[in-house]
Amino acid sequence: MIVRLLRRHLPGVRDDCRGSTALEFALVGSVFFTIVLGIIATGMVMWSRTTLQTVAVQTARCVAIGASACAGGGAQYAVSLANAWLPNQVLTTGDVAVAATTACFGASGNFASVTITAPVWLGGLIYPIAGGTQTLQACFPVSG
């Protein structure tokens, strides 16, 4: 019914294609950009998590071998590494726990254990949904 009215009163509407590209881009582009931003955000979260895991491993190693850089317990060393590799000072000394343990991931012995509990970092890309925490742990055997 509506099509008959349009054809009767506006005969050139059916053949007029102006604006169709903009309409198609609005429909497809919004979905496309949402997917692209989601992929970028997921990559940033994975990069942040991998970097913080590396910080935990390096800090556990530093504490285990008794390096002078970790003389204050290792938390400041972890923060300095994280600040060098991640922007916006994601990690604070309160987020890092360093302990001496006798078991680590099912292995027994003397270990230096580092646990990092930090917020999930998205770099402000999707700020309203950013949140939550991630916990990363690493152990290194103590020499001697």
Image (cartoon, rainbow, N blue to C red):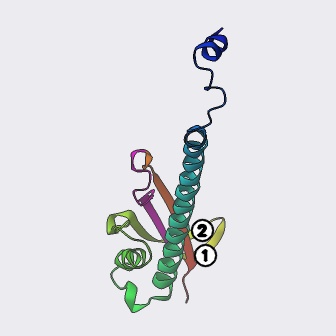
Examine the image and state in which quarter residue 139 appears.
Answer: bottom right
Q: Residues within 10 Å of mark 2 (few under 14, many from 20)?
A: some
- Mark 2 is on which residue type? Cys
Residue on which disc 2 sits: 104
- Per the rendered image, the range of residues in magenta is 112-128
Residue 111 locus on image (x, y percent): 54, 76
Q: Say which label, 2 or 1, has the lower sequence index.
A: 2
Q: Is residue 138 above or below residue 21?
A: below
Q: Viewed as shown, does residue 46 lie left or right of 62?
A: right
- Out of 42 and 62, give the one closest to the viewer: 42
Q: Viewed as shown, does residue 95 lie left or right of 19?
A: left
- Out of 9 and 85, give the one closest to the viewer: 9
Q: Viewed as shown, does residue 99 lie left or right of 5?
A: left
Q: Helix or strand or loop: what does disc 2 sit on?
A: strand
Residue 83 locus on image (x, y percent): 38, 75
The residue sitting at the top extreme is: 1
Q: Is residue 59 above or below residue 24?
A: below
Q: Is residue 55 above or below residue 23?
A: below
Residue found 66% across the figure and 30% down from its top:
15
Residue on which disc 1 sits: 109
Tag shown at residue 141: none
Real-space Cα separation, disc 2 to disc 1, in angstroms: 8 Å
Q: Is residue 11 above or below residue 69?
A: above
Residue found 60% across the figure and 75% down from its top:
109
Examine the image and state in which quarter residue 93 appears.
Answer: bottom left
For the N terminus, the quadrant is top right
Residue found 38% across the figure and 91% down from its top:
68
Examine the image and state in which quarter residue 106 appears.
Answer: bottom right
- Out of 95 and 71, give the one closest to the viewer: 95
